[in-house]
Structures are given as structure tokens and as C-alpha cells.
Image (cartoon, grey):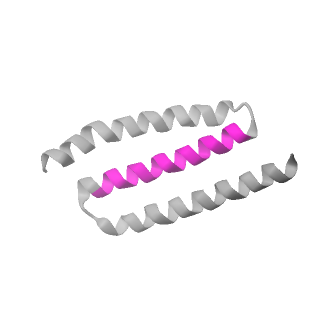
Amino acid sequence: MTWLQAVVSTVMLPLLMLAALLVFIRLLRGPSLPDRVLALDLLSTIGIGIIAVYVVVTGESAILDVATVLAIITFVGTIAFATHIERRV
């Protein structure tokens, strides 16, 4: 294990998990629907970061395709929600 892999696995992964926990609390508390959608968007972004950390530690670059698909789905979902909010107002 190189020094970069050690730093990424011991520092970045716990920070991402802490961020995911805090975002999940925001998801549960709300208070409004846009807050919850933003929390889901951020949660999926943190998931992409966790996948990236996994790729750096293990070296399996094929999993980056999963991160790319997750990013595209998240982007499309955010655009759809923004369109929904715009039509509602």
C-alpha cells in the first residue's frame, strides 16, 4: 500500500462517512421538500466520492463507470425536480 492509498483510506473515508451522516440527518429533519432533495443530491455526490476513494485504494478502475452513471442519474433527477418546482410556482 502506497502512502497515497494509506492517507485516502484512513483520512478521506471517515470524513466522507461523517459527511454522509450529517447529510442524512438533514434529509430526515427537512424542513421543506427542496431541502430534502438537496440532501439527496449531496448524499449521492458523497456516494460518488466514496466510490472514488474505493478506486484509489483498490485500483479497480472499472467501478468508475458506476460513479459516472450515478452522477448522470443524479443530475437528471435534480433537473427534473427543478422543472417541477418551476412549474408549481
Is 35 left or right of 66, judged from the image as shown?
Answer: right
Query: Horizontal and vertical percent for residue 10?
Result: 25, 38
Instruction: Choose between 10 and 35: the one closer to the eye.
Output: 35
The answer to whether 79 is drawn above or below residue 62 in the figure is above
The answer to whether 1 is drawn above or below residue 16 in the figure is below
Query: Horizontal and vertical percent for residue 2?
Result: 13, 50
Is 29 left or right of 66, judged from the image as shown?
Answer: right
Query: Horizontal and vertical percent for residue 35?
Result: 68, 37
Is residue 48 inside the magenta stretch?
A: yes
Is 82 left or right of 51, judged from the image as shown?
Answer: right
Query: Residue shown at 35%/54% (left/top)?
Result: 52
Query: Residue shown at 65%/58% (left/top)?
Result: 77
Identify the image quadrant of residue 39. Answer: top right
Identify the image quadrant of residue 63. Answer: bottom left
The answer to whether 74 is drawn above or below residue 15 in the figure is below
Query: Residue shown at 30%/58% (left/top)?
Result: 55
Query: Horizontal and vertical percent for residue 7?
Result: 21, 41
Is residue 46 inside the magenta stretch?
A: yes
Majority secondary structure of the magenta segment?
helix
Is 11 left or right of 42, judged from the image as shown?
Answer: left
Identify the image quadrant of residue 26. Answer: top right
Q: Which residues are magenta?
A: 34-55
Query: Residue shown at 58%/48% (left/top)?
Result: 41
